[in-house]
Image (cartoon, rainbow, N blue to C red):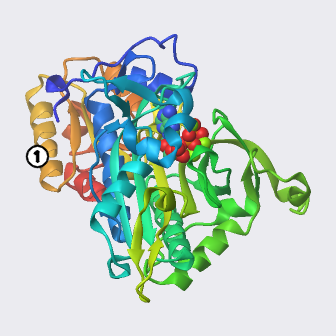
């Protein structure tokens, strides 16, 4: 992409309404624009990152054997009356009446809809296990929308639902989700710690939230620092292997890690004192096992191997796709701007032309642009007629992990400069070598 032809409305001043760094940087970098409280337009740069995050979530879900579908954002109230949640859900649910006087709602979550799909089409234990998921916009009429995409009213969420014949199979689904979530967050350069949590209005017996540590997080968290040493890394995971998934879950759930909702001071005292940490965290996902809570009242049953009709065991699982942008920025920035982890960066690298209009410099930039594109990388070429300082400031603000600086002086000795956004380290090398480095 050539910056002169792109739409990147960066702000010079700090927007007064932004209280936390991620919100400030997303506005300044021209990623989002608020259209109403907690409701945003995704400008091109923001949309690119959102789509990168979405793609990682899809890949990891499908790797775990989960099947994507897409449900509507608008739902009929009838299904929610069946489950008993229409009355229970309260004011966070945006209720709408259509022209025929029918009660509708903008879905805050989808347990009812998915259960209805399931009961209409699945009858036999032979069709299980089944996990369906979607990535779709949700609406919750949050009392205090704030912090930009972190607590929006309209937000993008991955929500998945497993259907299993019995408790053991459903617990395996729970474990599989935990492992796939750990892998998902790691690919985004994030450490998200699973913490025992409270099930809230979703209900159920087992639940973990995934929290990214950050001072601006809304949850208070208590954990054993040993948990922050754990990584999945390149481990080969067989998602059908119940023992392997269960072992990984045991590894991550053995060190103490809880949110304020489930914190147990006496248990926490059992953690060696030098490893006890109290901090704040951002909830980026949650998984639930809730047995037959929805399948029973809604009649989601299958015939088992003995010919009996039994309610299925279910769980639901969510990732805050749009909130993740904020969480990643909270975890990865400096005073100049965002620092995108490679996995989610909107462009792989930036090209800064120090002397726009100089024939040799322009030609060298064009060659680099073409070579990077041919190598499957996605460069953002700052070809505007601007001062070098302004170009550097824009690149630092939008946080591309690499910058290639091209100027007449370097070109005389056949070199460009490759700069690492995170460390600030710069290296002079030939344009060809720069492309090889980034590949
Ligand atoms: P919170 O405690 O922050 O209100 P929640 O527990 O109500 O979140 P869940 O029902 O667990 O949310 O939804 C799954 C995920 O969706 C959350 O872990 C979070 O990452 C994301 N999410 C929930 N509410 C919002 C929101 N208002 N704006 C952006 N993301 C959200
Ligand atoms: Mg909530
Ligand atoms: Mg919560
Ligand atoms: Mg939650």
How many numbered circles are shown?
1
Question: Residue reaching furthest bottom?
Answer: 306
From the viewer's perspective, is residue 24 above or below residue 81?
above
Q: Quadrant of residue 91?
A: top right
Name which residue lies at 24% across and 20% down: 99
Residue at 87% x, 60% y is 267
In the displayed structure image, the side of residue 392 where residue 17 appears, left or right: right
From where the camera sits, is residue 111 visible?
A: yes
Snapshot quadrant of residue 214: top right
Front residue (pair 166, 252): 166
Q: In this view, does 314 lie above or below 221?
A: below
Residue 271 is situated, as x and y percent measured from the top left of the image, at: 86, 62
Can you say which quadrant of the picture contains the N terminus? top left
Front position in the image: 212 or 301: 301
Q: Mark 1 points at which residue?
A: 370
Image location (x, y in percent) of residue 53 = 36, 48
| Image position, residue 66 (x, y; %) | 35, 66
Quarter of the figure that contains the C terminus: bottom left
In this orientation, which residue lies closer to the viewer: 423 or 1? 1
At x 52%, y 77%, the residue is 166
Image position, residue 385 (x, y; %): 19, 18
**Badge 1 element:** helix
Residue 326 appearing in the image: no
Q: Nearer the viewer, residue 191 or 245?
A: 245
* Residue at the spot 14% in from the left edge and 25% down from the top edge: 5
Q: How busy is the neighbourhood of tag 1: few (under 14 within 10 Å), some, or many (20 plus)? A: few
Question: Relative to 308, does residue 160 appear above or below in the rendering?
Answer: above
């Amino acid at each position: 992409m050539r910056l002169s032809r792109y739409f990147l409305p960066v702000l010079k001043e700090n927007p007064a309404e932004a209280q936390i760094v991620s919100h400030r940087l997303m506005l300044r970098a021209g990623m989002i624009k608020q259209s109403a409280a907690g409701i945003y337009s995704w400008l091109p740069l923001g949309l690119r990152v959102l789509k990168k995050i979405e793609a990682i979530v899809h890949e990891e879900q499908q790797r775990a054997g989960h099947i994507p579908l897409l449900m509507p954002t608008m739902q009929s109230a009838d299904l929610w009356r069946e489950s008993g949640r229409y009355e229970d859900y309260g004011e966070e649910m945006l209720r709408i009446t259509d022209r025929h006087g029918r009660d509708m709602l903008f879905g805050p979550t989808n347990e009812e809809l998915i259960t209805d799909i399931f009961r209409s089409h699945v009858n036999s234990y032979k069709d299980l296990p089944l996990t369906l998921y979607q990535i779709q916009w949700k609406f919750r009429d949050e009392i205090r929308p704030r912090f930009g995409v972190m607590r929006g009213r309209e937000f993008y969420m991955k929500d998945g639902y497993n259907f299993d014949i019995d408790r053991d199979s459903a617990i395996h689904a729970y474990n599989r989700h935990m492992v796939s979530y750990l892998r998902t967050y790691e690919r985004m350069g994030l450490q998200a710690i699973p913490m025992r949590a409270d099930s809230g209005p979703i209900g159920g017996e087992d639940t973990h939230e995934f929290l990214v540590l950050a001072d601006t997080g809304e949850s208070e968290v208590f954990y054993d620092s040993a948990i922050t040493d754990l990584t999945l890394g390149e481990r080969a995971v067989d998602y059908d292997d119940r023992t392997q998934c269960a072992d990984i879950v045991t590894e991550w759930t053995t060190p103490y890690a809880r949110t304020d909702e489930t914190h147990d001071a006496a248990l926490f005292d059992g953690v060696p004192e030098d490893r006890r940490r109290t901090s704040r965290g951002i909830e980026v996902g949650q998984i639930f096992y809730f047995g037959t809570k929805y399948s029973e009242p809604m009649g989601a049953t299958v015939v088992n191997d003995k010919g009996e009709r039994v309610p299925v065991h279910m769980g639901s699982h969510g990732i805050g796709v749009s909130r993740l942008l904020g969480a990643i920025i909270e975890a990865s920035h400096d005073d100049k701007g965002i620092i995108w982890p490679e996995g989610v960066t909107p462009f792989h690298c930036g090209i800064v032309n120090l002397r726009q209009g100089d024939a040799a410099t322009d030609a060298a930039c064009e060659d680099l642009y073409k070579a990077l594109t041919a190598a499957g990388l996605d460069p953002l070429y700052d070809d505007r007629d601007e001062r070098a300082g302004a170009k550097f400031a824009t690149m630092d603000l939008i946080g591309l992990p690499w910058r290639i600086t091209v100027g007449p002086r370097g070109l005389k000795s056949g070199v460009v400069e490759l700069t690492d956004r995170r460390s600030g380290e710069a290296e002079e090398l030939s344009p060809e070598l720069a492309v090889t480095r980034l590949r």
